[in-house]
Amino acid sequence: MPQNDKALLSRLIENKVEFVVIGGVCGVFHGASLITLDLDICCGFGCENLRRIETAVKDLNPHHRLTANKLALELTDELCARLKNLYLSTDFGTLDCLSEVAGVGNYDQVLQRSILRSTSYGEFRILDLDTLIAAKLAAGREKDLDAVKLLRAIKERKEQQKDLFD
Amino acid sequence: MIDEETLAQINGKYVMPPDAGPDWKAAAQYGFDMSLVEDALRMTPEERLEKHQRGLDLVLEVIAAGKNHAAK
């Protein structure tokens, strides 16, 4: 299955989804030389925002990738009220939507510790580098702790060389 | 005539920036290819994602090829 993060981000932006990029792609934006196979976002889990996500991927055969029968994404108000996370598979790749980030908190707290990124396909927010490091430490898996080593090096380098792209 | 140091670099020796801090050195020591990180830090964030996408496409191609091979 392809993974087109740019296309997924474009869809989210176009549909005015309120989100912050977290996880590996966030690390890539900060300069980490890691390959990551999905797009992780933290977002508001209010019904309106979830409906925007649904609209953004509606024509991409979205389904709940962790359900045994790959249940199609069909939100109802009742379901929205019960959701904490959405693990989606789409024709543009994997999109994991989380309501909170370990070590940081809920969407509002994540938003406060995010920075704006402007790209040719629109503006969106990503976790700031310190918070990404905190989140990776809290996640605590071996691959997260590996990433922390790299992210700390990047942080140190950016502090030394102010002319590098943030 | 290529000197020994240049030859070592051709063969993959990473030259630590003279002002590399402890975290940078630790990451290099751990095995990360810090030359790739140096390159990435010279790019704009958007360029970083583009580069990642190209790498990712390649990885997914290899995975798909592996699956096809296993299925045969």
Image: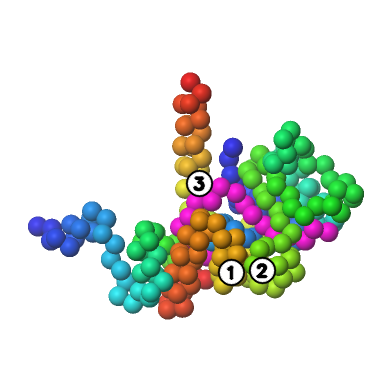
Front one among A44 and A125:
A44
Quadrant in which residue A81 is drawn = bottom right
Residue that mark 2 sits on: A104
Q: CA separation, marks 3 and 1?
A: 25 Å
Residue A145 visible in the current orientation: yes
Q: Are marks 3 and 2 in contact (CB under 8 Å)?
A: no
In this rendering, which labeled residue sits more in front, label 3 or label 1? 1
**How many tags in the picture?**
3
Q: Tell me the chain of label 1.
A: A
| Place of residue B39 in the rendered image (x, y in percent of width and height, measured from the top left) | 40, 62
Residue under the point 70% across and 47% down: A87
Q: CA separation, marks 1 and 2?
A: 7 Å
Q: Amino acid at mark 1?
A: Ala
Mark 3 on the same chain as mark 1: no
Mark 1 on the same chain as mark 2: yes
| Place of residue A144 in the rendered image (x, y in percent of width and height, measured from the top left) | 53, 59
Q: Are marks 1 and 2 in contact (CB under 8 Å)?
A: yes
Front one among A161 and A105:
A105
Residue A124 visible in the current orientation: no
Task: Give the side of residue A91 with respect to residue A154, left or right.
Answer: right
Residue that mark 3 sits on: B56
Q: Secondary structure at mark 2?
A: loop
The residue range painted magenta reads: A30-46
Residue under the point 23% across and 53% down: B11
In this rendering, which labeled residue sits more in front, label 3 or label 2? 2
Residue that mark 1 sits on: A134
Quadrant in which residue B19 is drawn = bottom left
Q: Secondary structure at mark 1?
A: helix
| Residue density around tag 2, few if under 14, some if 14–19, many if 20 or more, within 10 Å | some
